[in-house]
RNA sequence: GGAAAGGUAGCUCAGCUGGUUAGAGCACGGCACUCAUAAUGCCGGGGUCGAGGGUUCGAGUCCCUCCCUUUCCA
């Protein structure tokens, strides 16, 4: 019987683009989801931006825009990368949405009615200059233990001591450098320590099959703590100013972002139902009916850093809010991704950017496979090792898997016009396929993707061995052994079809091409296709290229890559001449091949100063009817607005550009073009291997700022 | 400080409830082959399973101590 699954990933905080950890989680969940769909189950896979909280409020303020605009800009950039990595979310929403406001307030009222909310005055550090209470991360000072300077208010990064902000020596506000003062305020608390909560959680966390053993263990530790370690109640309110959801009966108070964030799962699901997409996906019932139905399974994929919220607060909130809310069936936890053994760190510039990965043209299925090959069901960190990555992709996917089709298909096309034939029937082959498909299925179901990949590749090895043993290249020279040749190649190609079906959750694009182009199937693979020996094939078309180690080098160059700044510099130097030759259709963007740095004649500082480079915000971006390469941009320069035609259509979807900041040449003579007058030029980098890539200022820059 | 997970060939990792000479892929050396956007096949070298104790007829696998790595502490 088909399962009805409601699956989510953790909501990314909307103060910046995706990082590799997000993408790893999405890939893990997506593989599992695609596997479930191939089994014929009904899956509703949703995500959303986590939009509230002090960091976003402050970041927006620093940029001089509203938090809604900031969040909107971030959200606009999401689809490109989700699609880029083939993440098959059915819906993407935001916690800053009407659905989430209504649901959060509703959950709160129900919890209050259940007697689980109380209020209590607490003292907290307050920034008298800024006029707001300070979260721990916004207070710094000297560590009370090791006396290191400039440590955060919650823990020392030098000696790892954990303390309260009030323990800091010489504390100061990160926002204003002011000395914070203690100030009292009424806060609302969720009574997690209530015996009925604890009883429920003891039961929920220990239900067999619900949580991974390590996670259940951790939860038990929290639940059974005594004294200092005892389970505490949860402060769910924050004082204005705060970007969040107002608490209905407490003026000036907002829900702490962690209260409304998980409710965002439900808000996204509700919005998805309201959009009609659930119906299109085979679910005729309403949001409430679907959620309440006992057979509906609610499953969350999360990282190990947020276990506390998802195994204690979240199930307790849902349980005591009551129907139609239901408690999660499973919470699946993964570890972090490290790069060459080091924890990723944005500040140190290590780590890999998923944005850059796609931007330099690396194949998303390589990363999907690599991650799949190294994931298991445990809460273990996964290491991204560049050499390992190259070896795995080139050996496993290209050398073993794709190569099978490449070597067998040509014989069939040349000698048999695409017809397959199996000597001695197909029953034994089908039985073998069924056995391995069952094994791999169990591995996928248990999220043991690494094991699944090993099983699949072991099968690929056997297919290659058997093919070798038959020596088809010898058979092909002997007309008397035609049937033998056809049989050997047919078996290999059935093997290839089997592998393609088994790999489809990981390699959706390649599998879809194999189904359509090679086997002439009018739809993507279903799991049951593994048991159907193909009867004919079309000519083989190459399916996957090898990884060039140089691409890894490019991936690891820092974002502010020397090549990019060099290009920008060289182009700026040639600004005056750019419009004339580079590209007739894209005078607004500089995208010529960058000359070697040495070949650009040097200029004086005064010549450079003649350029008026400004930070600009892209207010609108739209396609230009009749233009192949151009996008029409409306740019906000602070004091004025400009219209610019930029030749970046090949690399950017207009929807993802809206709201982002870039750099423009503001004093370029206006140029009349076929489609209108272009009043400047935006800067982008490119060379023969990729681009154009728009330049962006670091966060904090505002429209109109002069670049020098 | 408290707690959790992990430490197995050069690299990345398998090894379920203890049981024959510890495995795979990659890398490395040799051979073979030619169908493959150059790949595959065969053979081989290489590990005192973090260290030290203990339980046992028998431990990478169980217990204790220690060392190291990573993470969590609302």
Image (spheres, rainbow, N blue to C red):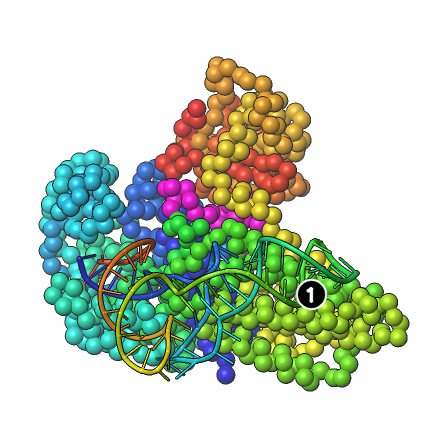
Write the residue at 55% across / 22% down.
A573
Q: Chain of mark 1?
A: A
Query: For the residue carrying disc 1, how many other residues have a C-alpha within 10 Å: few (<14), some (14-19), or many (20+)?
Result: many
Left or right of residue A426: residue A448: left
Residue nearest the viewer, comparing B72 with B39: B39
**Quadrant containing the C terminus of chain A in the rendered view:** top left
The image shows a total of numbered marks equal to 1
Write the residue at 66% across / 81% down.
A430
Residue A347 part of the magenta-drawn span: yes
Residue at the far right in the pictured view:
A479
Compared with A16, B46 (above or below) is below
Residue A654's spot in the image, x, y percent?
54, 45
Residue A35 part of the magenta-drawn span: no
Q: Is residue A227 visible?
A: yes
Residue nearest the viewer, comparing A263 with A375: A375
Residue A531's spot in the image, x, y percent?
64, 79
Write the residue at 78% across / 63% down.
A410
Left or right of residue A687: residue A441: left
Left or right of residue A116: residue A478: right
Left or right of residue A702: residue A108: left
Residue nearest the viewer, comparing A694 with A62: A694
Residue A528's spot in the image, x, y percent?
61, 78
Question: What residue would you read off at disc 1?
Answer: A404
Residue B48's spot in the image, x, y percent?
41, 64
Q: Which residues are magenta?
A: A345-366
Write the residue at 46% across / 48% down.
A352
**Tag 1, which secondary structure?**
helix
Q: Is residue A654 visible?
A: no
């Amino acid at each position: 019987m088909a399962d009805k699954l409601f699956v989510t990933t953790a909501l990314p905080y909307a103060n910046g683009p995706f990082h590799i950890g997000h993408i790893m989680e999405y890939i893990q969940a997506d593989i599992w989801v695609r596997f479930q769909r191939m089994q014929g189950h009904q899956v509703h896979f949703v995500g959303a931006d986590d939009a509230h909280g002090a960091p976003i409020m402050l970041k927006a303020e620093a940029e001089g825009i509203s938090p809604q605009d900031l969040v909107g800009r971030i959200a606009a950039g999401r689809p490109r990368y989700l699609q880029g990595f083939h993440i098959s979310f059915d819906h993407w929403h935001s916690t800053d949405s009407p659905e989430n406001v209504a649901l959060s307030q509703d959950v709160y009222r129900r919890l209050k009615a259940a007697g689980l909310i109380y209020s209590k005055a607490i003292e907290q550090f307050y920034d008298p200059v800024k006029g707001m209470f300070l979260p721990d991360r916004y207070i710094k000072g000297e560590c009370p233990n090791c006396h290191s300077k400039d440590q955060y208010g919650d823990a020392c990064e030098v000696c790892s001591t954990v303390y309260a902000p009030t323990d800091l020596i010489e504390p100061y506000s990160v926002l204003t450098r002011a000395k914070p003062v203690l100030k009292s305020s009424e806060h609302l608390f969720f009574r997690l320590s209530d015996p009925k909560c604890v009883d429920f959680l003891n039961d929920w966390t220990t239900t067999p099959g619900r949580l991974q053993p390590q996670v259940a263990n951790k939860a038990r530790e929290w639940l059974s703590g005594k004294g200092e370690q005892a389970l505490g109640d949860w402060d769910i309110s924050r004082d204005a100013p705060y970007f969040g959801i107002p608490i209905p009966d407490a003026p000036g108070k907002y829900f702490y972002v962690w209260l409304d964030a998980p409710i965002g799962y439900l808000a996204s699901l509700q919005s998805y139902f309201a959009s009609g997409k659930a119906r299109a996906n085979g679910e005729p019932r309403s949001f409430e009916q679907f959620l309440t139905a006992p057979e509906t399974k609610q499953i969350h994929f999360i990282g190990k850093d947020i276990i506390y919220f998802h195994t204690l607060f979240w199930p307790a909130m849902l349980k005591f809010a009551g129907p139609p809310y239901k408690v999660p069936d499973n919470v699946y936890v993964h570890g972090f991704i490290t790069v060459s053994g080091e924890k990723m760190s944005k500040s140190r510039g290590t780590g890999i950017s998923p944005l850059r990965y796609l931007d330099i043209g690396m194949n998303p299925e390589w990363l999907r496979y690599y991650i799949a090959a190294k994931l298991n069901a445990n809460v273990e960190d996964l290491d991204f090792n560049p050499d390992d990555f190259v070896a795995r992709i080139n050996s496993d996917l290209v050398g073993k898997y794709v190569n099978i089709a490449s070597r067998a298909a040509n014989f069939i096309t040349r000698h048999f016009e695409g017809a397959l034939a199996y000597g001695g029937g197909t029953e034994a082959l089908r039985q073998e396929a069924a056995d391995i498909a069952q094994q791999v299925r169990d591995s996928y179901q248990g999220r043991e993707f690494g094991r699944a990949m090993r099983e699949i590749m072991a099968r690929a090895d056997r297919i290659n061995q058997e093919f070798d043993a038959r020596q088809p290249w010898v058979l092909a020279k002997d007309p008397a052994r035609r049937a033998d040749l056809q049989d050997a190649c047919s078996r290999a190609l059935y093997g290839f079809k089997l592998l393609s079906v088994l790999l489809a959750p990981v390699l959706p694009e390649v599998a879809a091409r194999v189904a359509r182009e090679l086997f002439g199937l009018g739809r993507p693979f279903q799991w049951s296709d593994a048991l159907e020996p193909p009867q004919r094939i079309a000519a083989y078309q190459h399916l996957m290229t090898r990884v060039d180690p140089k691409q890894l080098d490019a991936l690891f160059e820092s974002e502010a890559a020397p090549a990019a700044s060099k290009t920008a510099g060289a182009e700026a130097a040639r600004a005056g001449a750019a419009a004339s030759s580079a590209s007739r259709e894209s005078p607004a963007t500089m995208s010529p091949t960058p000359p070697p740095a040495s070949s650009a004649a040097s200029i004086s500082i005064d010549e450079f100063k003649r350029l008026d480079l400004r930070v600009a915000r892209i207010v609108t971006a739209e396609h230009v009817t009749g233009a192949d390469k151009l996008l029409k941009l409306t740019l906000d320069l602070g004091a004025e607005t400009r219209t610019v035609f930029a030749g970046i259509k090949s690399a950017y979807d207009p929807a993802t550009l809206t709201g982002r900041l870039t750099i423009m040449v503001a004093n370029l003579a206006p140029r009349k073009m076929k489609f209108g007058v272009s009043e400047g030029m935006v800067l982008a980098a490119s060379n023969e291997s990729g681009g154009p890539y728009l330049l962006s200022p670091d966060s904090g820059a505002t429209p109109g700022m002069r670049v020098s």
